Amino acid sequence: MNDAPSVSLEREPPERALPERALPERELPAVSASPVRGRALALAATLTGLLLALLAMAARPGLPGGLWLGALGIVLGSGGALALTHRGPAPTVAESVPGSMLLGPGLQALAALLTFWLALRLAVQGVVPAQTAVLALVVPGAFLWLVLSLAVAAGRLGWLPEPERPLWRRHGLWLIVAITVLYLPRLGSFGLIDCWETHYGEVAREVLSRDDWISLWWAQDGWFYSKPVLNFWAQALSFSALGVAWAPDEMIRSVELGLTPQPEWAARLPIYLLTVLGQWFSYAGARRYVGRWAAFLGSLVLASTPYWYLLARQSMADMAYVAPLAAAMGCLLLALHSEPEA
């Protein structure tokens, strides 16, 4: 092992090499005219979000639409907390973008999200004609429509590196396309194939049935604390958002009516989304050191690796751990390659 050549993490690919000259000093951002007001608004958003999330979790019985109320609270509280702790230079590009430039991609993203959610909700109910074939086209299509709309909006806000590069030449976008085509078309169109899929799905179902998100429970065995909670929380949220009938003996009862309910879509969807985030961030981190093509091809190799491919299509605890770890490693690589001020 000591004879292996060392790899420097400071190497820059040729296409992004910086000229050998001192970087000009950056001008300090102008001080906001009302910093106290901005801090007060951020604090108010943080406290409001926390109260909404707490209300959604603590209400007995559960509030109608409590899932969406809690999600709104988490987004509002997280955004306010980030604004409170932000110490870097204020953004300038986004402030100069007129709202009309974001209206088109924003409406498209909303329409794509609604299409994606509605298709999955109908799949869970089993009411789509020729369900397997239709969903194999509609669900990936709606997801890619959503990704593309968000990418257009991010480009107009100046959040993408190399703004002059068109979307069709961005390897990260093509990576998401490849992952979607590989994993998503029939993600929920087959039954739970591993004994642990049924086990973990039951734990997530009992989170909703018992209305207890802290003390996990599994059937006759009682308390279930042998696995991290993220997988079960994600599945339970997915069950609730997509309208899975989580009451005992109700999940696939509509089979009696001649329907084909597929709650497997709700069980596996969070794992797929985590897989996309893990692979994209690990690609983004590796790209800074080995270039776009090497990082892209390496990510495709990972996506087609049998074990990774299998776990990306099952509601197992493994990917719920590995994908966030891969994303964190990608973020670390990005941080190590950034200027200290950034």
Image (spheres, rainbow, N blue to C red):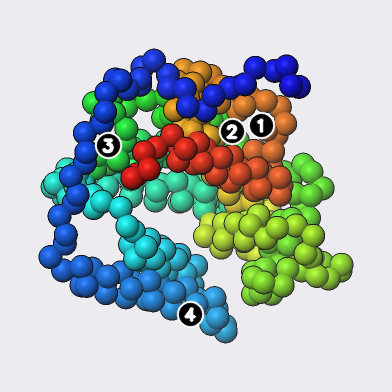
N-terminal label among 1 and 2: 2
User: In the rendered image, which residue does mark 4 sit on?
Assistant: 55
Identity of the amino acid at label 3?
Gly
Can you say whether 81 is above or below 173 in the image?
below
Identity of the amino acid at label 4?
Leu
Q: Indicate the position of residue 214 as horizontal and vertical percent values.
A: 67, 72
Identity of the amino acid at label 2?
Tyr
Q: CA distance from mark 1 to mark 2?
A: 8 Å
**In front: label 1 or label 3:** 3
User: In the rendered image, which residue does mark 2 sit on?
Assistant: 183
Q: Which mark is residue 155?
A: 3
Location of residue 16 by image quarter:
top left
Left or right of 120, for residue 267:
right
Q: CA distance from mark 4 to mark 2?
A: 36 Å
Q: CA distance from mark 1 to mark 3?
A: 30 Å
Q: Are marks 4 and 1 in contact (CB under 8 Å)?
A: no
Q: Are marks 1 and 2 in contact (CB under 8 Å)?
A: yes
Q: Indicate the position of residue 312 as horizontal and vertical percent values.
A: 64, 38
**In front: label 3 or label 4:** 3
Q: CA distance from mark 3 to mark 4?
A: 36 Å
**In front: label 4 or label 2:** 4
N-terminal label among 3 and 2: 3
Left or right of 278, for residue 308:
right
Can you say whether 285 is above or below 261 in the image?
above
Q: Residue at x 76, y 68 (%)?
A: 217
Tell me the element at label 3.
Answer: helix
